[in-house]
Image (cartoon, helix red, strand yellow):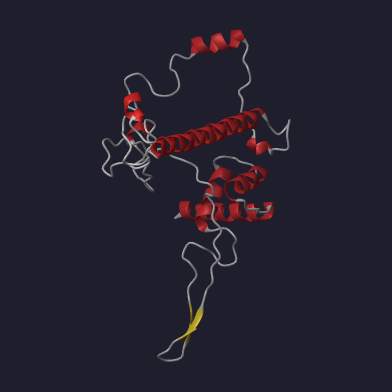
Amino acid sequence: MNEDLPQKLDRPSLCQLSKEQLVDIIIEQAIVIQQLQTTIKELKQEIERLRVSRDLDSKTSSKPASGDILKKPEKKESEASSEQNSSKRKPGGQPGSQGKTRKGFGRVDYFEILRPEFCTCCGHTEFVSEPVKIETQQVAQLVERPIEIVEYHRHTCKCSHCGNLQTADWAGDMVPGQDIRVRLQAFLGWINNYGHLPYEKQQEMLWELGGVEIGVGTLVATNERVSKSAGKFLCM
């Protein structure tokens, strides 16, 4: 809003303004209202999309079975009451215990500063640089692509001093000829041997996390390598 305009837009103040100033106020307020309407429309569309996605599963749509929301089967009233009476301790935090997650995660990967975009009172978009109050909260989130595809270009160069041809070493945590890096191999070995996740489900998981298509043969070979390495480590 124009800085020459009064901060408090009451009737006496508005009556003292010129026609051009009143038009400026109407235009700026209309812009703010239009922005709010667009935001509300987008939020409604997102809510509807989430509602539809929640109600769909692999049986009622083309979604893969890995995207199904696990629903607990309804228990009979007699079974529920019996289970409730037999279990005295409820899951989750117990009375008097201090929560772990609320203390933070022990690290922060990056900071995101959230500042107001416009004043809901006057529509102004400029604020004092120094905040009046700062609230902090740490959250753990799943990033869009947890799995990255890296293409290495290993160079062989000629020494400018003696003319020797020197080839660079491959990265320390990758194995030449293998499509999966060491850390991802270890993760797949864990979910296979400890999590007992079938290879077909592992394929779906890799596609969901990184858009990566990996054959069952590669997963089997990876699991065998991880199992052998773990066996050698235990025997040492």
Q: Position of residue 26 (x, y in %)?
A: 45, 34
Number of dots carrying numbers: 0
Q: Quadrant of the C terminus?
A: bottom left
Q: Residue at x 50, y 42 (%)?
A: 142
Q: Quadrant of the N terminus?
A: top left
Q: Is residue 124 left or right of residue 177?
A: left
**Residue 47 or residue 104, whichever sits in front:** 47
**Residue 87 or residue 57, whichever sits in front:** 57
Q: Is residue 232 left or right of residue 211?
A: left
**Residue 192 or residue 111, whichever sits in front:** 111
Q: Position of residue 79 (x, y in %)?
A: 59, 11
Q: Position of residue 232 (x, y in %)?
A: 50, 56
Q: Is residue 65 left or right of residue 114?
A: right
Quadrant of the image occupied by residue 95: top left
In the depicted structure, whether residue 161 falls above or below residue 172 = below
Q: Residue at x 63, y 11 (%)?
A: 76
Q: Position of residue 136 (x, y in %)?
A: 33, 37
Residue pushed farthest bottom?
162
Q: Is residue 93 left or right of residue 158?
A: left
Q: Residue at x 32, y 34 (%)?
A: 103
